[in-house]
């Protein structure tokens, strides 16, 4: 499925994930915090405008775990960061 993001980048996606890889890659330069997570977790967090530890603290771990791309290893990593 071809998708065009709000910034005009065209990309093909075979899953239901609609995060533009071009936008996500450029944003990661500004949000190095996300780089410690897997690519699916990075996309999920970025899509929900969670780009810092402060943003994570504003969210419930149970809600975060429901996001597509957030798995057990990401939740464990977040727990380590919060302690």
Image (cartoon, helix red, strand yellow):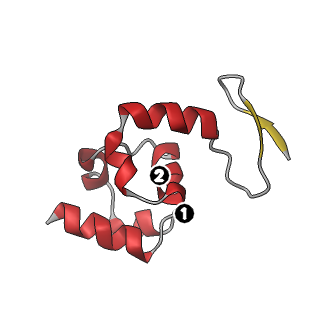
Question: Hey, which quadrant is residue 61 in on the image?
Answer: bottom left
When the figure is inspected, residue 25 is found, relative to residue 73, above or below; the finding is above
Q: Position of residue 23 (x, y in %)?
A: 57, 32
| Residue at the extreme top | 8
Q: Name, please, the residue furthest toward the right.
A: 1
Which of the 4 quarters of the picture holds residue 19? top right
Residue 79 drawn at (x, y percent): 25, 69
Q: Which mark is residue 69?
A: 1
Identify the residue at horizontal 47%, vertical 52% (top origin). 42
Q: Tell me the tag on residue 54.
A: none
Instruction: State which quarter of the image contains the C terminus.
Output: bottom left
Q: In whole angstroms, how far apart are the C-alphas of marks 1 and 2? A: 8 Å
Q: Is 35 placed left or right of 42 in the picture?
A: left
Residue lying at 68% horizontally and 46% vertically, measured from the top left: 18
| Pointer 2 local density, CA inside 10 Å: few below 14, some 14–19, many at least 20 | many
Left or right: residue 37 versus residue 69 is: left
Residue placed farthest to the bottom in the image? Answer: 72
Rendered view: 36 above or below 74: above
Circles 1 and 2: CB atoms closer than 8 Å: yes
Position above or below: 71 against 25: below
Callout 2: SS: helix
Marker count (numbered): 2
Q: Quadrant of residue 76?
A: bottom left
As helix, strand or loop, the secondary structure at mark 1 comes to loop
Tag 2 residue: 42
Mark 1 or mark 2: whose residue is earlier in sequence = 2
Please indicate whether residue 66 sits to the left or right of residue 78 in the image.
right
Mark 1 neighbour density, 10 Å: few (under 14) some (14–19) many (20 or more): some
Q: Position of residue 57 (x, y in %)?
A: 25, 54
Residue 7: x and y, percent? 65, 23
């Amino acid at each position: 499925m071809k998708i065009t993001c709000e910034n005009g980048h065209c990309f093909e996606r075979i899953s239901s994930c609609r995060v533009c890889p071009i936008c996500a890659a450029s944003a990661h330069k500004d949000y190095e915090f996300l780089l410690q997570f897997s690519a699916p977790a990075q996309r999920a967090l970025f899509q929900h405008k969670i780009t810092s530890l402060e943003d994570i603290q504003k969210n419930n771990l149970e809600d975060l775990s429901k996001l597509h791309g957030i798995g057990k290893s990401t939740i464990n990593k977040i727990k380590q960061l919060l302690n």
